Amino acid sequence: MRFVVELEHGPDGVHGRVTREGSDRPEPFHGWLELLRLLEPPDVWGNPWDDP
């Protein structure tokens, strides 16, 4: 998956917007941890060790 990250650094820290590949709506973030959360894969329900 690809992302477009618009990052700004100011006196109050980092902030910006992340747009996922295939999406036309950027998601805003404030701080490094929130940016990292947006870059993680989406939550998947169920146990990954279960047989399909």
Image (cartoon, helix red, strand yellow):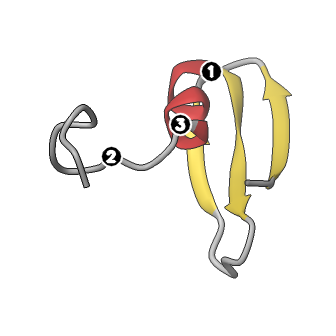
Q: Amino acid at mark 1?
A: Trp
Q: Amino acid at mark 3?
A: Glu
What residue is rendered at 24% in x and 31% in y? 49
Which comes before the other along the chain, label 3 or label 1?
Answer: 1
Q: CA distance from mark 1 to mark 2?
A: 20 Å
Q: Answer with the quarter of the image where residue 1 lies.
A: bottom right
Percent coordinates x, y for residue 44 in the rendering: 29, 49
Q: Answer with the quarter of the image where residue 9 lies.
A: top right
Q: Residues within 10 Å of mark 2 (few under 14, many from 20)?
A: few
Label ID, residue 43:
2
Percent coordinates x, y for residue 23 in the rendering: 66, 77
Q: Residues within 10 Å of mark 3 (few under 14, many from 20)?
A: few
Label ID, residue 50:
none
Label ID, residue 40:
3
Q: Amino acid at mark 2?
A: Asp
Q: Secondary structure at mark 2?
A: loop
Viewed as shown, does residue 1 lie left or right of 33? right
Q: CA distance from mark 3 to mark 1?
A: 13 Å
Farthest front residue in view: 51
What residue is rendered at 15% in x and 46% in y? 46
Contact check, label 3 and label 1, Cβ < 8 Å: no
Q: Secondary structure at mark 3?
A: loop
Q: Secondary structure at mark 1?
A: helix
Residue ID for mark 1: 32
